[in-house]
Image (cartoon, rainbow, N blue to C red):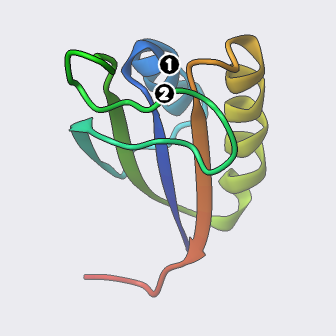
Amino acid sequence: MKAIFVSYNQAHTLEVNATLDRLGIRGFTRWALTEGRGSVDGEPHYGSHAWPSMNTSLMIFCDDDKVTPLLDALRKLDASAPQQGLRAFVMHAEQGM
C-alpha cells in the first residue's frame, strides 16, 4: 500500500476529484486550504493580499497498482497549467486498521 501526498492550486480541485473517481481511488483525506510555495519556481500560495491564491492538499492511500496511473494523470494535469502548481510525493504505508 502507498501513501501519496498531493498539493495543488485549489483551481485544480474538480479535475483532481474526477481523476480519483476515474481511477477508483476512494481513500483520502483533504485539507481544503493549505499554504505553500514551490521549491523551484512558481508564485507562493499564501491567501494574502499580495499572494491571494491557496492550495489544497490530499493524503491518498491506495494499492501499489494505482500509483503509476495516478501520477501519470496528475503529471498531465500539471502540464496543462504549470503556473498553477501541482506536486505529488509517494511513500510506503503500512496496513492500517
Which of these two is toward me, 81 or 15?
A: 81
55 vs 71, left or right, is: left
State the residue at coordinates (44%, 32%).
Answer: 44
State the residue at coordinates (36%, 31%).
Answer: 55
Q: Secondary structure at mark 2?
A: helix
Counting labels gives 2
Residue at the disc numbered 2:
21
At label 1, the amino acid type is: Ala
Q: Report x, y in % for residue 95.
A: 42, 84
4 vs 75, left or right, is: left
Distance between the alpha carbons at the discs numbered 2 and 1: 5 Å
User: Within the image, what quadrant is residue 83 found in?
Assistant: top right
State the residue at coordinates (49%, 80%).
Answer: 93
Q: Report x, y in % for residue 84.
A: 56, 19
Which of these two is toward me, 41 or 78?
A: 41
- Above or below residue 92? Residue 14 is above
State the residue at coordinates (61%, 51%).
Answer: 39
40 vs 13, left or right, is: right
Pointers 2 and 1 in contact (C-beta within 8 Å): yes
Which of these two is toward me, 12 or 29?
A: 12
Residue at the disc numbered 1:
18
User: Within the image, what quadrant is residue 76 found in?
Assistant: top right
